Amino acid sequence: MIDEAERKSEPEQDEDEEQGGARSAIILVAVIIIVAVFSTSYGLQTLQWIAGHQWARQNAWLYDTPKPVPSSATGPNAGVAAIAPPTAAGKNTKADGQSQGTELSEYGYQMNVPWTSKMKENPSAGGAEFRFATGQVVIFGDPEAQLDTVHILRDTPGEQYLPYAPLFANGEIQTNYDLYKAAYNASPSQVTPFTNYATAQRDRVLLLMKLSFGFDLAKPIYSFDFGKNRGFQFGDPASGPVALHVFDPHDKHLRFIFTVAAGSGGKITQDDINEAVQSMQSVESTFGKNKQGQ
């Protein structure tokens, strides 16, 4: 009787096994379809998401994006210094009638700084150095050393241009300032496997551009917009040298360094830097000259 019952259950067992095999096959096909659809729709984005985080493991600063430059001022005009035009003697009087400052001029540009001690201009690698007796040092970088990156990329011939095409696809990048702003505001955390294809392509190129630009001297990274002069600051004057990349109204890219001579006891505040950058302007008539040093 037992053997007969067992023989009767064998077809049922075979049927269960067949049904189980069929279910497994259906599940496998469904998984393959899901993977295929995901790979087709999000494969590139996933690879770029992985690549972005791999780059960041070696360059953790890729996660850093610019914060607004700080200022001790408050109110609607915070961070915007009130500066009167320089006098004929090369001095600068603040609009509020407080202390005078000094005009620095080189490479066809001038700016006003608040220090009034004796100053000497010295040649510097890739620029001109202005050194004050009280310890403050300002270096004007040679503008010719800064590349016109946007036009170089757009003038790249034929197929060599294709890797950069996503940068300009949506029309948001028209100037070098636009490019630097987009690149430094890019972060691996913004890329996900579900980002749309075009955005993923653009984000990938921006992260590569950010790696190419690097960070200058020190972190953190700040941004500023004083109307006619916009750009980025690397470092905090309270803790060390500061490098600035400034874009003038004509999108000319300029680099400056503000630092203090070792052992001098001199100080540079963020407001000093904000004031200087806001005052910067092109003065072609004084190209290559420093009135104060003559």
Image (cartoon, rainbow, N blue to C red):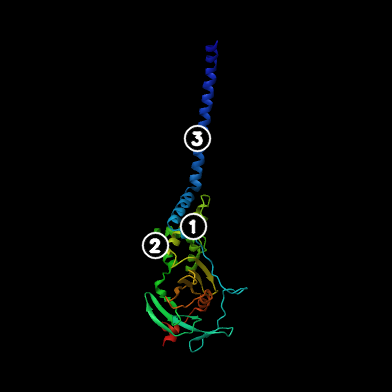
**Residue that extends furthest to the bottom in the rendered view of this protein:** 89
Quarter in which the C terminus is drawn = bottom left
Give the crowd class for mark 1: few <14, some 14-19, many >=20 residues within 10 Å. Answer: many
Residue that sits furthest to the right in the current view: 75
User: Which residue is drawn at the image coordinates 49% and 41% (left, top)?
Assistant: 35
Residue 277 against residue 47 in the figure, above or below? below
Q: Of discs 2 and 1, which sits in the foreground?
A: 1
Question: Secondary structure beneath disc 3?
Answer: helix
Horizontal and vertical percent position of residue 255: 44, 73
Which residue does the numbered mark 1 point to in the structure image? 203
Spatial CA distance of label 3 from label 1 is 34 Å
Of the image marks 3 and 1, the number of the one nearer the N terminus: 3
Name the mark on residue 28. 3
Residue contact between numbered discs 2 and 1, judged by CB atoms under 8 Å = no
Q: Label 2 to label 3, Cα distance in Å? A: 47 Å
Q: Which residue is mark 2?
A: 157
Position of residue 74 measured from the top left corner of the image (x, y, whole percent): 61, 73
Secondary structure type for disc 2 = loop
Q: Amino acid at mark 1?
A: Asp
Quarter holding residue 287: bottom left
Crowd class of label 2 (few under 14; some 14 to 19; many from 20; radius 10 Å): few
**Residue 200 horizontal/vertical position (percent):** 49, 54
The crowd level at tag 3 (other Cα within 10 Å; few <14, some 14-19, many 20+) is: few
Going by the numbered disc 2, the residue's amino acid type is Pro
Residue 180 or residue 75, whichever sits in front: 75
> Which residue type does callout 3 highlight?
Leu
Q: Is residue 65 above or below residue 240?
A: above
